[in-house]
Image (cartoon, rainbow, N blue to C red):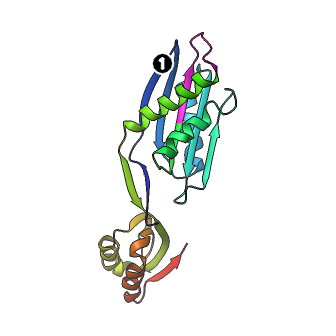
Amino acid sequence: MDTYNTIEKPSMAEFKDRGSRFIAYAYPVGDTVDVKSRLQQVKKEHPKAEHHCYAYRLGVDGLQFRAGDDGEPSGSAGRPILGQIDSKGLTNTAVIVVRYFGGTLLGVPGLINAYKTATALALQLVPIVSKPVEARYTLHFDYTQLNDVMQVVRQHQMRVIEQETQLFCRVVVGIPKNRLTEALYRLGELYTVEVKAQ
């Protein structure tokens, strides 16, 4: 697997059923810390909502996931949200659906449909992007080599994650897996650059 699919930017959509409002927020996320801060942000924006249900899938292998019903009947909210993320083949994606109760009980099938539909609408509004699976490396080198190093970084479509440029520089890069051998060879040619896998 050289690439994975995620969403490009956050989006929001609303679905109404018998007076209840379901507001879905979709976010590109990198880790569980990201997910928690998004959830806190949505709870702050909607303190009067009855439920803040969510689901996410993380990691290039998609093995890290969670679905939360937040007081709705078990399996009626988080699972349908996760089902929509999965049906689009997404990872590093979280969806939070806020529910304002409208006075009429929807029953489990109604809830499943509402959470699923709100999530589907939010995910339809945002472009899906294919990103390269990356290997992280830390580069240590002398400031005089900054231009040479950055040239190799650009040529091999590496993503700069962190950068400290002083007399001695430290740069953390994400190297696309399908360009790894070639990129490491080129960095190795810059003989005083220290390359370490993270």
Is 167 placed above or below 77 here?
below
Residue 153 left/right relative to 136: left
**Depth order, front residue of 25/163:** 25
Q: Quadrant of the C terminus?
A: bottom right
Residue 123 coordinates in the image, percent (x, y): 42, 38
Residue 18 left/right relative to 159: right
Residue 183 coordinates in the image, percent (x, y): 38, 79
Is 120 placed above or below 188 here?
above
**Depth order, front residue of 139/111:** 111
Residue under the image location 40 percent in, 58 percent down = 131
Q: Quadrant of residue 177?
A: bottom left
Residue 104 coordinates in the image, percent (x, y): 60, 11
Residue 68 in view in this figure:
yes
Q: Outermost residue toward the top?
A: 103
**Depth order, front residue of 103/173:** 103
Q: Given the image, on which type of amino acid does mark 1 rest?
A: Lys
Residue 142 in view in this figure:
no
Residue 10 coordinates in the image, percent (x, y): 42, 40
Q: What segment is highlighted magenta in the picture?
A: 96-107
Residue bearing the label numbered 1: 16
